[in-house]
Image: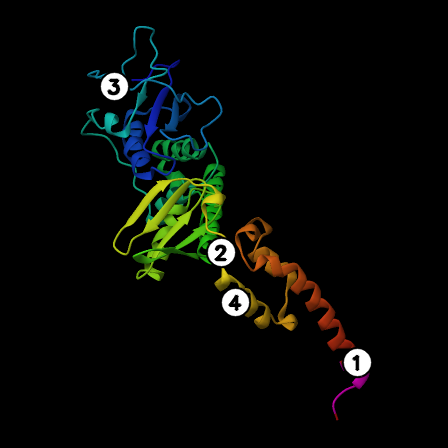
Amino acid sequence: MVTDDATLVIELAGPTDWAGFRQACRVLLAEGVPPEQVRWRWGTADDHDAGDPVATPAAPAHADLFSANASASVTGRALTPRDLDRVPLRADQRPLRLSREQLRTLQGASLHRDAGRFELCHRWLHRTHADPRLRQDVLDADWRQLERMAHAVGRDIHKMHAFVRFRPTRRPGEPDLQVAWFEPAHHIVLAAAPFFVRRFANQRWSILTPDLCVAWDGEQLQTAPGARRADAPPADAGEALWLAYYASTFNPARLKDQAMRREMPRRYWANLPEAVLISTLVQQARARTGRMLNDAARDGPAP
């Protein structure tokens, strides 16, 4: 058991290791380890907490992974979820049962950029395991925060589906590779990728992001470390055609400026080819709409 002054460091496989988090929590809840005595980290450089013990050594092969060392502390010992699975659980342990919607919310929140997301998930699970009535408390402060985080992640996935723009890259002797650059707000790349697999199943494509890159070779999805914007291909002639089409189909009478900015926030404009036209088209739309209203007022009602 972890002593009062100890800190247990759990090493996840990465910043989106939901399966590892669930695996570790199964043991932590069974052992009653308080969330404030647990630190979550992962083996990549992505969004580590300030002061995160990134260089702590792996756990030694103790018979009891929760036993203290000679200084009565487990601080600095990093354990993986697989290490925790070696802890024998008592047969009388009461499992925590959650609804599918609650699990989806927790999984969504675990993809948020907030560095304390796993601590928050663990705290709510720990509290709910101690008092199962919290499963029905939709106004609980921790749960409401988890819902807000999961909503932000879901919105970011939706934006990625809507705002990814591919550009073709020629490859001698091979099919063209469609490449896109995107900057997600949260850790959503793997969660969003199945949409592109379904939609572009017969093409070869790659989506580059600062966190993680994904590529589809027609048969399986592959991952690679994050990239830079300079790694994405520049604009080509096909993009000019798309901009011409976008401008020609822009209807000034249907412009809703605030709604457009709400659905297409400025933070995404840098990745959208058509964004270079938006300001000009909006200004022209207002002028054209004003002229149409003036003409209608001058001509009077139709007979």
Report the span colored magenta.
Answer: 296-302
* SS type, badge 3: loop
Q: Which of marks 3 and 2 is nearer the N terminus?
A: 3
Sequence order check, earlier mark of 1 and 4: 4
Residue 118 image point, x, y percent: 40, 33
Q: Distance between the residues labelled 2 and 1?
A: 39 Å
Looking at the rendered image, the quarter that the N terminus falls into is top left
Residue most extreme to the bottom = 303
Q: Which colour scheme is used?
A: rainbow
| Residue pointed to by mark 3 | 65
Do the numbered discs 3 and 2 sit on residues whose CB atoms are within 8 Å? Answer: no
State yes or no: residue 213 in magenta. no
177 to the left or right of 140: left
The percent position of residue 32, horizontal first and vertical second, equals 32, 25
Q: Mark 2 points at which residue?
A: 163
Location of mark 1 (residue)? 297
Label 2 crowd (10 A; few <14 / some 14-19 / many >=20): some
Q: Which of 221 and 95 is in front in this view?
A: 221
